[in-house]
Image: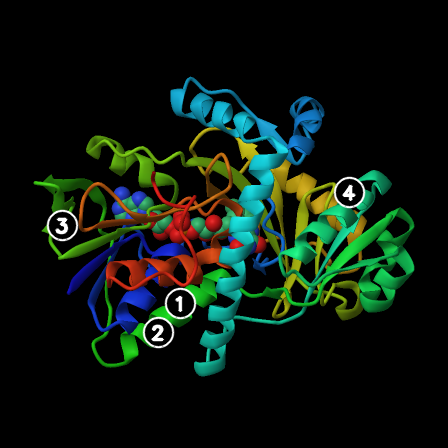
């Protein structure tokens, strides 16, 4: 059948991949001049299969007031005259309880483990160059109380199949010598050997290369702005664009933070709101000064991944409207975080600053699956985990659209 994928971020590209592999005639529509030029461009690069616990949890509530008051806090909130923002906050606060967070963690872990399996299958059977490494991850705690609660979470996650180890500061530096400068502050860390990292932009471009070089190539139409979805008797009959109406048999909507705008006129509400984050791409100056294992500074919510010759540093979550505009103060804060954690990693002359809008849902669960319109499928709301989860959600959609059972249950991820 003819399938149109709306949006060429990592969610759209992964969907295109699995529909293409099923033999469908796939067209990807994208307003930019290439793939992965919005939120999927310079994200943290972490394939964070075992770190999926949502931001919304009971433990986050007491942290909110200091986060809101301090200008350098990892999470910032700027109220807008926007009902969607307030609705999102109300749903987020309602999800901040242990029962919901545990349920979300369990479902996301299942999805992430499935994604890991698909990633390993993908890189095992295709030659792909996207700075991919199976390098493990250290989540470093500088606060003893948070280390203790991380150890408790480790026990819980172990029951769900995550293989992790708690390490003291000395042991951390033994396995990652670049943590030497940080070691006096380290209370302990959780080490997960099975985590991967890679460059999401290159990943999407590599998938595109493979999909356009074989038989039945995927067609990419860039510079196409989707203006309206055209419903007709319980189905979509086409999408209206700046290049006219484009029609297909089935439509996969993967429009990131713009999804609610296109869905609302159809009466479909997806609770996606942009959570702005920042990254730096620092050329590595001293090989021993930059970590080889991916590192997360838990308290500062900053992640570090070595991608080829660069150190990718990402963090911040700003609930501050819908515009992806870089705030220089946030970039300075991120630079200062790296200078404290890995002072020798870079000479800091080239920073590669970037900001992106995470398509966040209040609970931290993507919205996938069917809609009240028989031939319209959703793949949106991956929040802070789009690179990690995209293969699983893309594969699940292709299975469901083909009438096959999904390998893992989709309850909790669907619209209703
Ligand atoms: C700072 C930061 C760090 C992150 N770190 C990680 C990480 O380490 N690991 C991880 O797994 N995830 C990470 N993420 C999250 C991840 O980047 C996102 O979840 C993911 O990129 C979302 O992909 P998407 O395809 O849903 O959205 P997008 O990449 O935004 O793609 C949506 C596409 O739709 C197109 N589009 C929208 N509207 C229209 C329209 N009307 N017409 C045509 N085209 C349209 C856009 O141009 C865009 O290309 C991070 C995010 C940020 C911001």
Quadrant of the rendering where the N terminus is positioned: bottom left
**CB under 8 Å between callouts 1 and 2?**
yes
Distance CA(mark 3)–CA(mark 2)? 24 Å
Residue drawn where x is 45% and y is 36% of the image: 274
Residue at image x 56%, y 71%? 132
Q: Is mark 1 within 8 Å of ligand 1?
A: no
Q: Quadrant of residue 198?
A: bottom right
Residue 38 point in image, percent of width and height: 41, 49
Looking at the image, tell me whether mark 2 or mark 4 is earlier in sequence order.
4
Give the Cα separation between the discs numbered 4 and 3. 54 Å
Indicate the secondary structure of the residue bearing disc 3.
loop
Task: Determine whether the residue tagged by mark 1 lies in a helix, strand or loop.
Answer: helix
> From mark 1 to mark 3, how far is it between C-alphas?
24 Å
Residue 241: x %, y % from top left: 16, 46
The answer to whether residue 9 is seen in the rendering is no
Q: Residues within 10 Å of mark 2 (few under 14, many from 20)?
A: some
Query: What residue is pinned by disc 2?
Result: 209
Lower position in the chain sequence, tag 4 or tag 3: 4
Please name the residue that numbered disc 4 is placed on: 149
Estimate how packed mark 1 is, as few (under 14), some (14 to 19) or many (20 or more) residues with alpha carbons within 10 Å: some
Give residue 243's mark. 3
Visible in this render: residue 271?
yes
- What's the distance in space between the residues labelled 1 and 2, CA to CA? 6 Å
- Quadrant where the C terminus sits is top left
In the rendered structure, the answer to whether residue 398 lies left or right of residue 200 reads: left
């Amino acid at each position: 059948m003819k399938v149109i994928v709306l949006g060429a971020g990592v969610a759209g590209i992964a969907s295109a991949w699995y529909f293409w592999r099923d033999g469908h005639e796939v067209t990807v529509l994208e307003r930019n001049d290439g793939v992965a030029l919005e939120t999927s461009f310079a994200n943290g690069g972490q394939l964070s299969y075992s770190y999926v616990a949502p931001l919304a949890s009971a433990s986050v509530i007491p942290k909110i007031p200091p986060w809101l008051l301090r200008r350098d806090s990892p999470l910032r909130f700027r109220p807008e005259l926007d009902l969607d923002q307030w609705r999102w906050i109300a749903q987020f606060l309602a999800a901040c309880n242990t029962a919901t967070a545990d349920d979300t963690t369990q479902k996301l872990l299942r999805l992430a483990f499935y994604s890991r399996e698909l990633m390993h299958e993908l890189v095992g059977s295709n030659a792909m160059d996207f700075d991919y490494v199976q390098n493990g991850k250290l989540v470093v705690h500088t606060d003893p109380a948070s280390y203790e609660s991380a150890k408790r979470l480790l026990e819980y996650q172990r029951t769900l199949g995550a293989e992790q180890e708690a390490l003291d500061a000395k042991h951390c530096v033994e396995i990652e010598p670049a943590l030497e400068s940080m070691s006096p502050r380290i209370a302990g860390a959780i080490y997960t050997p099975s985590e991967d990292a890679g460059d999401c932009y290159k990943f999407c471009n590599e998938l595109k290369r493979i999909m356009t070089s074989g038989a039945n190539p995927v067609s990419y139409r860039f510079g196409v702005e989707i203006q309206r979805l055209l419903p007709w008797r319980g189905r979509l009959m086409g999408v209206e664009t700046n290049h006219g109406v484009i029609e297909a048999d089935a439509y996969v909507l993967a429009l990131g933070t713009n999804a609610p705008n296109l869905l609302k006129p159809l009466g479909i509400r997806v609770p996606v709101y942009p959570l702005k984050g920042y990254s730096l791409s620092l050329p590595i100056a001293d090989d021993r000064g930059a970590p080889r294992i991916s590192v997360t500074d838990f308290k500062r919510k900053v992640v570090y991944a070595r991608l080829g010759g660069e150190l990718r540093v990402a963090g911040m979550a700003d609930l501050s409207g819908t515009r992806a505009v870089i705030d220089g103060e946030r970039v300075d804060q991120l630079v200062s975080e790296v200078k404290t954690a890995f002072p020798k990693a870079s000479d800091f002359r080239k920073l590669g600053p970037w900001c992106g809008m995470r398509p966040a849902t209040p609970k931290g669960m993507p919205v996938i699956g069917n809609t009240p319109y028989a031939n319209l499928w959703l793949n949106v709301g991956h929040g802070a985990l789009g690179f990690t989860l995209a293969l699983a959600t893309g594969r699940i959609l292709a299975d469901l659209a083909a009438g096959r059972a999904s390998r893992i249950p989709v309850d909790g991820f669907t619209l209703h």
